Amino acid sequence: MKVLVVGSGGREHAVVKKLAENPEIERIYCAPGNGGISVQATPVDIKAIDAEGMVAFAKKEGIDFAVVTPDDPLVLGMADAMEEAGIPAFGPSKKAAQIEGSKVFAKNLMKKYGIPTAKYEVFDDPGKVVEYIERENCFPAVIKADGLALGKGVVIAKNLEEAKEAVHSIMEDKIFGKSGNQVVVEEFLTGKEVSVLAFTDSHTVSPMVSSMDHKRAYDNDEGPNTGGMGTIAPSPYYTADVAKRCMEEIFLPTVEAMKKEGCPFKGCLYFGLILTEQGPKVIEYNCRFGDPETQVVLPLLKTDLFTIMRAVRDEHLSELDIQWSTGAAACVVLASGGYPKKYETGFPIEGLDEDGGHPGVIVYHAGTKKQDGKFLTAGGRVLGVTGLGDNLPQALEKAYDAVKEITFEKVHYRTDIGKK
Ligand code: AMP
Ligand code: GLY
């Protein structure tokens, strides 16, 4: 079997490494991939959003199965394009990917089907948003651009001034383009945040181990929002009771709702949750694996990933009994100094072996390139170093021990992953 993985980050490296464990797969391609991924997969120089180019390549190479991992190609319909060309694909259809591609769609879905989430209003007129926020006078106010915005479309405004600025830049300056044609203003929720990724074939929902992201750039949750600076799995707050409620009140109703709306969801559905005093509530859906959640979740998966992906695509997930390790995982992201704002690249990375790994941990490459046998930094988030252990403290110790030995100029990482 020849498998094509679309994407280029740490998440894609985690998927590629897990797929590589399946002996039926003779070759993995990754488009565009990165320096570290190229150790396990053949890099293909096609942009992740280029559906036409990707399908043409898959046909020419005789790809047997495609895994579409990032949000943009899914929202643009790459999984459909693969299927239309006769190539089985893991990933939701364009219609189903709306659950992430449009916050208005997601919020209306939750309201219609009684799925717990923050109260909200939708606006397409900037004046009306400001009027509403002024009238409600309830801060912080949460303002969300409707469409995809590179993970930066959510503003938590502490006062009216900040709210006005956000509305202006999203709806008038259009910093996220069309994604800012509409905004959602919603109630601010408090509680522990938990991410749960779930495999679903639109009939069966199989949640993975829970995880917890650390989105701010600096320790103590300070600094700007990033794509994610580290993760742990499982989340200690996600107890069996909470898991049961989530399954009954959120996961199954969501998958059922998508079917009823005529857009059955097949793939990995990501539930971003806040555990409030009234119970778990949804703050966001993603139509894909999370990054860097995948870097702690997949290492704990004991069942073969390719078998699961095919069962999802062929809609017989109920036949599988997916097994998870009872241990824990922790991932610390090594970023380029300055990320998520301006940063430099091209620095050599010290402390990696010739395959881009390091003893005792799994090193996932997010932004690296390989030149003359050396790995160089090539992005904002550079590496994700994952430690595994019987429990969270052990996993964290392993990850941080390795992080001390892997370095590059101007490296930045958080020292408090998993402390909360
Ligand atoms: P998102 O891009 O939707 O993941 O949102 C980014 C972050 O904003 C989330 O991880 C939360 O920390 C925060 N957030 C989003 N919505 C809410 C809300 N309604 N109440 C409190 N925090 C929120
Ligand atoms: N870590 C959050 C995400 O992948 O969107």
Image (cartoon, grey):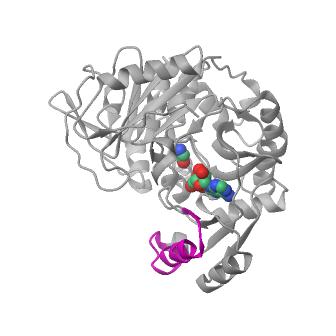
Judged from this view, the residue extending furthest toward the left is 372
Placement of 278 over or under 232, stated as above or below: below
Residue appearing at x 56%, y 47% in the figure: 83
Classify residue 183 as left or right of residue 406: right
Query: Quick check: is 22 in the magenta stretch?
Result: no
Q: Is residue 225 visible?
A: no
Classify residue 74 as left or right of residue 333: right
Residue appearing at x 55%, y 63% in the figure: 155
Classify residue 279 as left or right of residue 271: right
State the extent of the magenta-drawn residues as a range: 154-177
- Which quadrant: the C terminus? top right
Residue appearing at x 59%, y 75% in the figure: 160
Q: Quadrant of ligand 1?
A: bottom right
Query: Picture coordinates of residue 290 (x, y %)?
Result: 55, 42
Query: Picture coordinates of residue 126 (x, y %)?
Result: 59, 82
Q: Could you say which is closer to the camera, residue 219 or residue 360?
A: 219
Query: Picture coordinates of residue 236 (x, y %)?
Result: 67, 29
Classify residue 122 as left or right of residue 400: right
Placement of 414 over or under 24, stated as above or below: below
Count of numbered circles on the image: 0
Query: Picture coordinates of residue 249 (x, y %)?
Result: 83, 45
Hey, which quadrant is residue 62 in on the image?
A: top left
Q: Is residue 9 visible?
A: yes
Q: Could you say which is closer to the camera, residue 135 or residue 39?
A: 135
